[in-house]
Amino acid sequence: MIIDWPAFLLAALAISVIPGANQLLGLRNAYREGARVALVAVGGRLAAFAVMVLLVSAGLGTVLLQSERLFTAIKWIGVAYLLYLGVQTLWSSLRAVPPAADGVRRRPGRPVRGVWALSREEFLVAGTNPKAVLLFAALLPQFVTGQGSVTGGLLAVGAAYLVVEFVVAIGYAVVGARLRRAHVSARVDRNIQRATGASLIGFAVYFATSRQPA
């Protein structure tokens, strides 16, 4: 078995760095709740991706690629959830108040979000992202060739992708945390939330119009 590590790591980094729904979610979480909480919540995203890696390693990735009904079901669940998060974020921006004296941005009647809730969001966004599912099903096998345990090779590159994803997530969390510490005005705070909500809705529209590869 041969794994083309240089090509894989370059591809994995390029894919992870491109802003997507989960990276945007991590940035939002770091801005609203802090980098530490955001990075713990990334565990939900990595758990969803780990499940995808296991499915691909077990040979179920091909089933997904060929199943239009399954792909469609996953797609519309993801679309609905992203729309929910986007609308929720936009609504929150309308109710936003200036940052408190301790630097924590709180909203009327709403406590600071818990790690479990944020982790669940990360897991659902990642697990219902049709592009992410197809990414693992189509990308990982491209870098494992030759004789030997293909399953072992897929697990190895899948684990490596999770590491790359987490490293990139750290970068997004740092950016979000710096915005948080900048003590921006209430107006800028609302604009950031509005841009985030609009972007999440944009991703939902993009997924809704995407088609399963032939």
Image (spheres, rainbow, N blue to C red):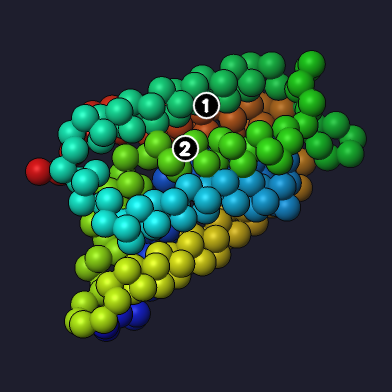
* Residue appearing at x 32%, y 69% in the figure: 151
Instruction: Nearest to the eye among marks 2 and 1: give it.
Output: 2
Residue that mark 2 sits on: 125
Residue that mark 1 sits on: 85
Do tag 2 and tag 1 residues touch (Cβ < 8 Å)?
Answer: yes
Give 67 or 160, whichever is nearer the viewer: 67
Check disc 1 and report its element: helix, strand or loop.
helix
Measured as percent of width and height from the top left, residue 88 is found at: 57, 21
* Residue appearing at x 60%, y 51% in the figure: 43
The three-letter amino acid code for the residue at tag 1 is Leu
Task: Report the side of 80 relative to 2 (left or right).
Answer: right
The three-letter amino acid code for the residue at tag 2 is Val
* Residue appearing at x 21%, y 77% in the figure: 145
- Residue neighbourhood size for the residue with mark 1, other residues' Cα within 10 Å, grouped as few (<14), some (14–19), many (≥20): many
In the rendered image, which quarter contains the C terminus?
top left
Q: CA distance from mark 2 to mark 1?
A: 9 Å
